[in-house]
Image: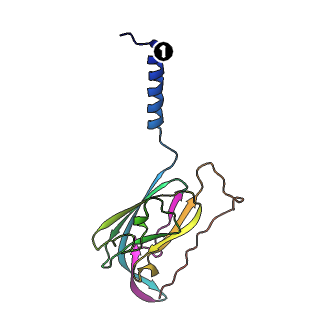
Amino acid sequence: MAINGDFVSKTTLFLVGLIAFISFPAEAAVRKYQFDIQVKNVSRLCHAKPIVTVNGRFPGPTIYAREGDRVIVNVTNHAKYNMSIHWHGLKQYRNGWADGPAYITQCPIKTGNSYAYDFNVTGQRGTLWWHAHILWLRATVYGAIVIMPKQGMPYPFPKPNMEQLVVLGRFQ
């Protein structure tokens, strides 16, 4: 049985193209964050009080991502309270079970356990926020999510001279 030379060259070209397509990564990045939930003494106006924090900070860290990125936030609960995080305003396509409302869309993260929130930022730009979604913990466990446009895409407004992130909260 003879093999046609034209068939071999077309097949070879197809296979080389397929390998090139698979091996070149897309422009979207994977953004990884570690949130350690812990109790820390915080002093405000000469009054110290133990509060639940993220990575020892109040408010917690800001998540930065670009439209199209994949975000993985590993939450480890070192506090004595069950914990869950809600990604407020973030569209949860095909992963609504991890949107944070404890006992509704997910089980809470128990003391000593971890959970990895894994979601894609799709069709969104702007500044949103995340917060605890169980009991009173939302009062101290929260932070911002800054979603920038895809690389090379402009903002839908003139570029400002500077940006300042303001996260408001209440500490008693």
Report the residue at 66% width, 53% height from top. Answer: 154
Q: Position of residue 120 (x, y in %)?
A: 48, 56
Depth check: 166 or 98 in front? 98
Report the residue at 49% width, 88% height from top. Answer: 45
Q: Position of residue 42 (x, y in %)?
A: 42, 82
85 inside magenta stretch: no
The image quarter in which residue 168 lies: bottom right
The image quarter in which residue 80 lies: bottom left
Q: Residue furthest top?
A: 2
Q: Is residue 64 above or below residue 49?
A: above
Q: How many marks?
A: 1
Report the residue at 45% width, 22% height from top. Answer: 11
Tag 1: residue type?
Answer: Asp
Depth check: 144 or 104 in front? 104
Q: Residue furthest right?
A: 158
Report the residue at 43% width, 64% height from top. Answer: 96
Q: Specify how the rendered protein is coloured.
A: rainbow
Q: Element under label 1?
A: helix
In the image, taking residue 13 as reference, residue 36 lies left or right, namely: left
Q: Is residue 16 above or below residue 155?
A: above
Q: What segment is highlighted magenta in the picture?
A: 46-65
Q: Is residue 1 above or below residue 127?
A: above
Q: Is residue 20 above or below residue 37?
A: above
52 inside magenta stretch: yes
Which quadrant is the N terminus positioned in? Answer: top left
Q: Residue furthest left?
A: 112
Q: Position of residue 55 (x, y in %)?
A: 40, 70
| Residue under pointer 1 | 6
Q: Position of residue 33 (x, y in %)?
A: 42, 61
